[in-house]
């Protein structure tokens, strides 16, 4: 994030249990909240596509080398989650994994990448496979690549 963005207010998820998870995560640098039901958890901050406000949520994640993998499942709903719509409009995001914070660029996996990476994420959280079967939309798999120094 830019120097200006570092001083902006970040709005946490309006979902009560997610907001509580975020508060614990931030307060303890991920010592409490770095996993959720045994699954690795990170904090993702996006810029609201309409409001311009920084918005933070907690998500389960997987890894592909140095990249972080996210699934825009929205609990299997027939619509994309707001965080996915936000990063689709502005791919610059901030990730917090435990105490580490960094800027990244988020993008939806290509069809070829998805074939390889979807099994990675269903291994991390098997319920993603059930979510996909329960909706007609293709649930996006997001790759977050760490931004190189001086970019973003």
Image: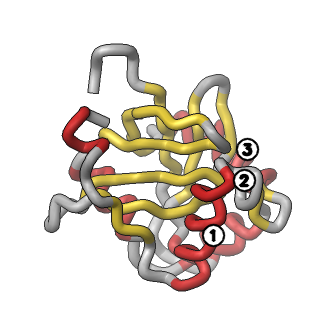
Between circles 3 and 1, the one closer to the viewer is 1
State left or right for residue 130 relative to residue 43.
right
Q: Where is residue 14 in the image (x, y as percent from the top left)?
A: 42, 80
Judge whether residue 40 can be spotted in this image.
no
- Residue at mark 1: 21
Residue most toward the top? Answer: 149
Q: Distance between the residues labelled 2 and 1?
A: 9 Å
Q: Marks 3 and 2, how far apart in space?
A: 19 Å
Which element type, helix, strand or loop, lies under badge 3? helix
Q: Which residue has dot 3 on it?
A: 120
Q: Which of marks 3 and 1 is nearer the N terminus?
A: 1
Indicate the position of residue 126 as horizontal and vertical percent values. Answer: 78, 63
Where residue 143 appears, x then y in whole percent? 50, 39
For the point 51% across and 37% down, which residue is it?
101
In the picture, measured across the screen, residue 48 lies left or right of residue 95, that is left
Residue 34's disc number: 2
Quadrant for residue 24, please give it.
bottom right
Q: Quadrant of the N terminus?
A: top left
Q: In this view, does 95 lie above or below 12?
A: above
Residue 108 location in percent, x, y? 42, 44
- Nearer-the-camera pick, 108 or 90: 90
In the rendered structure, the answer to whether residue 148 lies left or right of residue 95 reads left
Q: Give the side of residue 130 with respect to residue 55, left or right.
A: right
Earlier residue among tags 2 and 1? 1
Taking depth in this image into account, of 46 and 73 the one nearest to the observer is 46
Mark 1: few/some/many CA within 10 Å (<14, 14-19, 20+): many
Residue at position x 80%, y 52% from top?
123
Residue 112 shows up from this direction = yes
């Amino acid at each position: 994030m830019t120097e200006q963005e570092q001083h902006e207010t970040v709005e946490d998820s309006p979902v009560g249990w997610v907001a509580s998870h975020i508060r614990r995560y931030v307060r303890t640098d991920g010592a409490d909240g770095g996993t959720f039901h045994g699954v690795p958890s990170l904090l993702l901050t996006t810029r609201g596509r309409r409001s311009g406000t920084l918005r933070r949520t907690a998500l389960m994640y997987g890894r592909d080398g140095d990249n972080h993998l996210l699934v825009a499942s929205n609990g299997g709903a027939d619509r994309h989650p707001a965080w996915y719509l936000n990063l689709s409009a502005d791919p610059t995001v901030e990730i917090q994994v435990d105490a580490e914070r960094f800027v990244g660029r988020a993008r939806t996996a290509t069809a070829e990448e998805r074939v390889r990476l979807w099994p990675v994420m269903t291994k991390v959280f098997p319920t993603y496979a059930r979510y996909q079967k329960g909706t007609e939309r293709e649930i996006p798999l997001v790759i977050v690549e760490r931004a190189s120094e001086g970019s973003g």
